[in-house]
Image (spheres, rainbow, N blue to C red):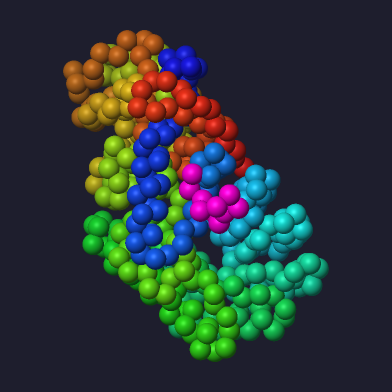
Amino acid sequence: MNLPDLETPALVLDEARMTRNIDRMRSHLDELGVSFRPHVKTCKSIDVARRMMATPSGPVTVSTLKEAEYFLANGVSDILYAVGIAPNKLGHVLALGAKGAKIKVILDNVEAARVVVAASRDATAPLEALIEIDSDGHRSGVQPGDPLLLEIAGALESGGARLAGVMTHAGSSYNCTTVDAIRAMAEQESDAAVSCARRLRDAGYPSPTVSVGSTPTATFARDLTGVTEVRTGVFVFFDLFMAGLGVCRTSDIALSVLTSVIGHQRDKGWAIVDAGWMAMSRDRGTAKQVVDQGYGLVCDVNGKPMGDILMIDANQEHGIIAHRSGDPARLPDLPVGTLLRVLPNHACATGAQHDRYHVVQEDQRVAAVWPRFSGW
């Protein structure tokens, strides 16, 4: 099968670019002496995950218990569920453990710790939990220096659950405007996690795992002394948001949406395609960056960007292609039936709109079709 044989819209994965991204991240983390726990929320595919994992059994990071269920069914047992645990999910966590998952949960409050302790009484082995650290004020977590850290540790250990360590995610790295700022954020992230692990150990509590990670900080970290593992996910495909941060080049982006020109509004300088926000997602993250990429940067069928041609707007099933300037004279000739590939703002969100990858190498041949899944 070749790309022109596909019905559009279709999700296209450039395997060579993906492989280079994986190899680059592996090499970087190996040099820093830390283990790699890839986040599989971006790919939601065992075919992609196998290329990232250190062993067939993992480790991996997940964002949903559906991901945990799916990857466990495919032989992946070393799983970190990296969203604060809700009481109504602990039954599912216990069921995964009974099926052989070595699953860890995270939490940042005493109430959740007590619920985990209570659930451990019904488990064949104590539940393992990491305490989430707030390293940047971005989202959730215990702030370094807060007495709450030791209160949570005490609630877990005295109640019979197992404290597995600490974890943090420097989500504010997505707001950095320079590479130097990302490097500083990477240092801040690791310092927060390492210092909290030290506080736990000094108080007599275990902290075997010190887990950090975001794609920007993982990419630019220079010293991870005291960190045991790094989690990162979107690096596998990259996207326009990461390119806008300076984390990757446009030529590193491995994911695109294949779409067909279905009409024109020539007086407006528009070509209409059959991929709208149901194919691209509603994510407009680059609108806050120096260069706004609309709903995606347009490439030819071979994946080569066409200058400043963007998907400037989108309805549910229709996309509007135009020159960034809005000048009708600057839109190239795109006859009805022309195939285009649109690079996404956010690989996770765009991927979530599709149920399979059409895997290509450096030509138009579809070498494989890899299933992916969505939902919770």
Instruction: Specify the quadrant of the image occupied by residue 21.
Output: top left
**Percent coordinates x, y for residue 104 in the rendering:** 62, 64
Frontmost residue, 309 versus 7: 7
Frontmost residue, 317 versus 88: 88
Q: Residue furthest bottom?
A: 203
Q: Is residue 273 above or below residue 42?
A: above
Q: Which residues are magenta?
A: 51-60
**Percent coordinates x, y for residue 72 in the rendering:** 66, 49
Frontmost residue, 128 versus 180: 128
**Percent coordinates x, y for residue 80 in the rendering:** 58, 60
Instruction: Specify the quadrant of the image occupied by residue 319.
Output: top left
Residue at the image point whose x is 49% and y is 44% from the top = 51
Residue at the image point whose x is 46% and y is 58% from the top = 36
Asked whether the viewer can see residue 239, the reply is no
Q: Is residue 220 above or below residue 135?
A: above
Q: Main secondary structure of the magenta part?
A: loop
